[in-house]
Amino acid sequence: MPTPLVVSDVAKSFTMHLRDGVTLPVVAAVSFSIRAGECAVLGGPSGAGKSSILKMLYGNYAVDEGQIIIQHEGGLIDLASASPRTVLAVRRHTIGYVSQFLRTVPRVSALDVVAEPLVERGEDREGAREKARTLLAQLNLPEKLWALPPATFSGGEQQRVNIARGFITEHPILLLDEPTASLDAKNRDVVVDLIAAKKAAGVALLGIFHDLDVRDAVADRVIDVTAFAAGKIAA
Amino acid sequence: MTDEPLLRVSALSKFYGSRVGCENISFDLWPGEMLAVVGESGSGKTTLLNCLSTRLLPSSGTASYRMRDGQWRELYRMSEAERRFLMRTDWGFVHQNPADGLRMTVSAGANVGERLMAVGDRHYGRIRATAVDWLSRVEIDEDRIDDEPRAFSGGMRQRLQIARNLVTGPRLVFMDEPTGGLDVSVQARLLDLLRGLVTDLGLAAIVVTHDLAVARLLSQRMMVMKDGRVVESGLTDRVLDDPRAPYTQLLVSSILQV
């Protein structure tokens, strides 16, 4: 089984220069890998560094130490030391990300928010919109909302737009930051189905799920983040 | 996707006497990329923009530009006439104050058409048709084409300035606080418009702004300047979500939450 994502000895801390330069260690010696077709879940209490790990894997947080090796465009690259331009290419083609909250752009319709990642990959706009319609329908977002900018949507509606945007592409690696947090049971089941379809398609998934039912339904294994607690290494 | 940058800047510095304008700035810009330069007033970001657009000559350092024929040319070794030609055809410059980039006493259509004539178009009907097309792309009604920009609102003037700059199909656009001085609702419309145009046209842009929200919305990469130097640079969302330099942390922590 191919392994498109290998994390080895990654460490992360925050230095707060406005607080006399105090350093907050977050995680250290983070090491794991995800195989294609597998869904791994980051486990551990709030503040253990789950989101920070996900954000490092997306290039959204800088990495202090270690390597994040991913299969990208037929080669291997270290995301931890990659240039901004490489990170952008990785996001376009290799790593997808469903964040907890949707960052909306004024005046862009929900449909185009969802279609955008495909358009960025060079697909024609109408074809991308067609796929977006299919996904939004699957996620039970009322059709009358599709043409509206999501800024005024409810939390659950925004999250479904966000999920559709993350699932529309065929990225070989997909990161999920609590994608079901504000969904009702029916839509949680839709997301579980979408994740199962991604697994069947050979996508490597890594997620954070506080909802235990969803976690049990999708997880092949749980990676315990408390094992990477930054204090542990020094002790 | 080309593998070559469009602009290469190396160790660029500009001194005003003994005072530092900007110092030791180096970066590459690729086609289709939006680079935001942020920092407070006096940080040197406008000096940098003016050096890059050759409106100002630097004290030292180089900037090379890949011309349409693929040849690399050093900007500060070009003749004044060559630089002017580049500015009229392959580049655009969007000023904070539209009055600096528009001719206020000729019609909106002429403001757009003039740039086309500068690149050699002489066919009146075609120029007018292109002007109409561009006015509609920046959401200005066709029946305003014969009005002077003096009669336009601030937001409309700024959209007209953008049309005037983009009509020649430039590959690189410089923007100095493009949304400065506009109402928030007008800003949002302009930002959305700019985003759409830049994506559709695949052009590269350098945007100077003190507004981090504008930088987040428009740019993929960001440079943070303080006292004429770059204190932090990287992916825009990385710099804003995980700021490393003390000054960047101060800037990010100073954003008012709405």
Image (tube, grey):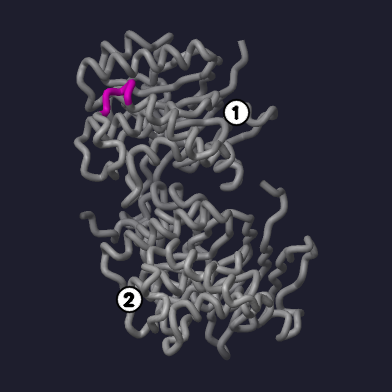
User: Disc 1 versus disc 2: distance between alpha carbons?
Assistant: 48 Å
| 1 and 2 marks in contact (CB < 8 Å) | no
Residue stretch rendered in magenta on the structure:
A137-141
- Locate residue A34, reporting x and y percent: 52, 18
Q: Nearer the viewer, residue B162 or B240?
A: B162
Dot 2 falls on a residue whose secondary structure is: helix
Q: Which residue is mark 2?
A: B154
Question: Can residue B161 be seen here?
Answer: yes
Residue at x 65% of width, y 75% of height? B121
Task: Check the image and report above or below for B112 versus A138.
Answer: below
The overriding secondary structure of the stretch rendered in magenta is: loop
Q: Residue A170 location in percent, x, y?
A: 52, 25
Residues packed near mark 2 inside 10 Å, few (<14), some (14 to 19) or many (20 plus): some
Q: Position of residue B26 (x, y in %)?
A: 63, 64
Residue type at mark 1 is Ile
Left or right of residue B163: residue B254: left
Q: Residue drawn at (65%, 69%), measured in percent from left and top? A: B90
Identity of the residue drawn at 56% across and 56% down:
B201
Residue B87 in view (yes/no) = no
Q: How many marks?
A: 2
Tell me which amino acid carries mark 2.
Gly
Q: Which residue is mark 1?
A: A70
- In the rendering, at what x and y percent does residue B231 appear? 50, 63
Looking at this view, is B168 or B239 the one in front? B168
Q: Nearer the viewer, mark 1 or mark 2?
A: 2
| Callout 1 and callout 2 share a chain | no
Whether B131 is among the magenta residues is no
Q: Chain of mark 1?
A: A
Asked whether A138 falls inside the magenta stretch, the response is yes
User: Which residue is at 61% across, 70% downward?
Assistant: B91
The answer to which of A184 and B99 lies nearer the viewer is B99
